[in-house]
Amino acid sequence: MRRLAIVAGAVAGALTLTLAGCGGSDSGSGSDAASGKAELSVAGAYMPQPVSDMAAGFLTIINKGGADDRLTSVSSDAAGQVTVHETVDGTMREVEGLDIPAHGELVLKSGGNHLMFEQLKQKPKEGQKVSVELRFAHSDPVTVDIPVKPATYSPKHGH
Ligand SMILES: [Cu+2]
């Protein structure tokens, strides 16, 4: 299991680059087979301090590699269950997983895709960190320490 540093702030500039040249292929046949596999990193993770025994988590998974990957499951010692949710027309629902396109990114943000922590063992407080393990269809699992922010915290997104 690799432990990746969270590089908040460095993301905004990188996104423009990673999105350029993305041909939008959804054939699944690997239009960019030359560079082989996904190269994942995580940026901008945070959890608004929860007000109940449920919490949401947000982060961006950047894929610099030439192959698609997929976030398939998440777990944390801090919660009985962590699920992946999407938001459609203001209503959230659990999904089996979320795609991380080659040379692209998967964005989990307020009002959109998010991690859902249920059955919190202790209510995380601002300034603490919640460790989660992200698991993928192809890449090795990645552990992220998600910093807990004020309940009203909203990041400045570069896009
Ligand atoms: Cu949710």
Image (tube, rainbow, N blue to C red):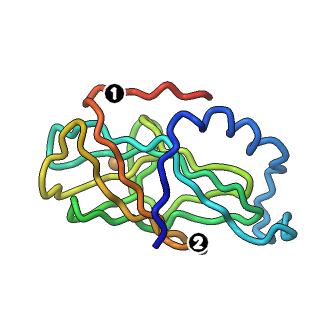
* Image coords of residue 40 (percent x, y): 61, 59
Q: In this view, does 62 lie above or below 111?
A: below
Secondary structure of residue under mark 1 = loop
Q: What amino acid is at disc 1?
A: Tyr
Q: Who's the residue at 68% across and 39% down the image?
A: 15
Name the disc covering residue 139, or none.
Answer: 2
Q: CB of mark 2 within 8 Å of CB of mark 1? A: no
- Between residue 72 and residue 157, name the one nearer to us: 157
Q: Quadrant of residue 117?
A: bottom left
Q: Which of marks 2 and 1 is nearer the N terminus?
A: 2
Q: In this view, does 121 lie to the left or right of 3?
A: left
Horizontal relation, residue 75 to residue 134: left or right: left
Left or right of 55, for residue 98: right
| Amino acid on which disc 2 is placed | Ser
Other residues around mark 2 within 10 Å, as few (<14) / some (14–19) / many (≥20)? some
Quadrant (top left, top right, bottom left, bottom right) of the C terminus: top right
Residue at 48% across, 45% down: 108
Q: Nearer the viewer, residue 112 or 63?
A: 63
76 to the left or right of 14: left
Seen from the viewer's position, the closer of residues 29 and 41 is 41
Q: Where is residue 49 in the image (x, y as percent from the top left)?
A: 23, 37
Q: How far apart are marks 2 and 1 (CA)?
A: 31 Å
Q: Confirm or reject: label 1 Cβ below 8 Å from ligand 1.
A: no
Which residue is depicted at the point 56% across and 52% down? Answer: 61
What is the number of the mark on residue 72?
none
Q: Position of residue 151 (x, y in %)?
A: 25, 30
Looking at the rendered structure, which numbered label has been put on residue 153? 1
Vertically, is 133 above or below 157? below
